[in-house]
Image (cartoon, grey):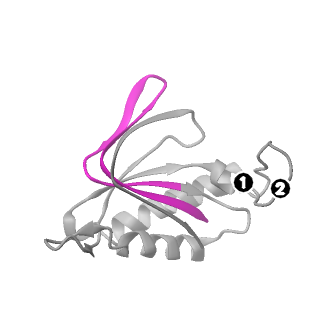
Amino acid sequence: MRIVVQRVKSSRLEANGKVVSEIGFGYNVFVGVLKEDAIENVKKIARRIATLRLFCDEDDKLTYNISQVNGEILLVSNFTLCDRKNVSGARPDFSLSADKDTANSLYEELKRILVEEYNISVKMGVFAEDMQIYTQLDGPINLVQEY
């Protein structure tokens, strides 16, 4: 799995001209599911997201995780994160991405773990749809992770 975590002050996701999800401060998390991914990858990613310390204390040090600041997550499936690295040519190659059913299942499982095991408020994007995301980045802090 590949993820991009963005610390945000707010974020709103629209699909088909309608607001689908909206969060206050927290994270946008973009998720790319690779062919070889399984539940073990999802558990590692969930733990990483839940324990990242990307929120500042009174000394401006990154001390607090998302639960400690009552932040929210906007979780967005994004197969374009599955681009093959070091491919010649200008056209991206998404052949590493999992099939739709597997990707959606693992994406839904990630949400379930974040909500049920880490008690984090999670809003979702719309799987396999064209989405528009309006975000106020905070920092900006953006992390790219792969498990």
Q: Residue at x 76, y 46 (%)?
A: 92
**SS assignment at label 1:** loop
Please tell me whether residue 77 belongs to the stretch shown in magenta: no
Percent across and percent down for residue 28 are 41, 52
Image quadrant for the C terminus? Answer: bottom right
Q: Is residue 90 above or below residue 141?
A: above
- What kind of secondary structure does the magenta stretch mostly adopt? strand
**Number of numbered discs:** 2
Q: Is residue 128 above or below residue 65?
A: above
Q: Mark 1 — residue?
A: 83
User: How far is the residue under mark 1 from the one under mark 2?
Assistant: 9 Å
Q: Residue at x 32, y 73 (%)?
A: 53
Q: Residue at x 56, y 33 (%)?
A: 130
Judge from the rendering whether residue 66 lies leftward or rightward of residue 96; answer left or right: left
**Picture disc at residue 87:** 2
Q: Nearer the viewer, mark 1 or mark 2?
A: 2
The one nearer the camera, 135 or 16, is 135
The one nearer the camera, 89 or 83, is 89
Which stretch did the figure color magenta? 1-30
Q: Residue furthest top?
A: 17
Q: Residue at x 30, y 63 (%)?
A: 120
Q: Residue furthest front?
A: 59
State yes or no: discs 1 and 2 in contact (Cβ < 8 Å). Answer: yes
The local crowd at label 1, few if under 14, some if 14 to 19, many if 20 or more residues have their Cα within 10 Å, is some
**Picture disc at residue 26:** none
Percent across and percent down for residue 51 are 36, 75
The one nearer the camera, 143 or 22, is 143
* Amino acid type at image mark 2: Val
Percent across and percent down for residue 122 are 35, 55
Please tell me whether residue 3 belongs to the stretch shown in magenta: yes
Q: Residue furthest right?
A: 88
Judge from the rendering whether residue 108 lies leftward or rightward of residue 116; answer left or right: right
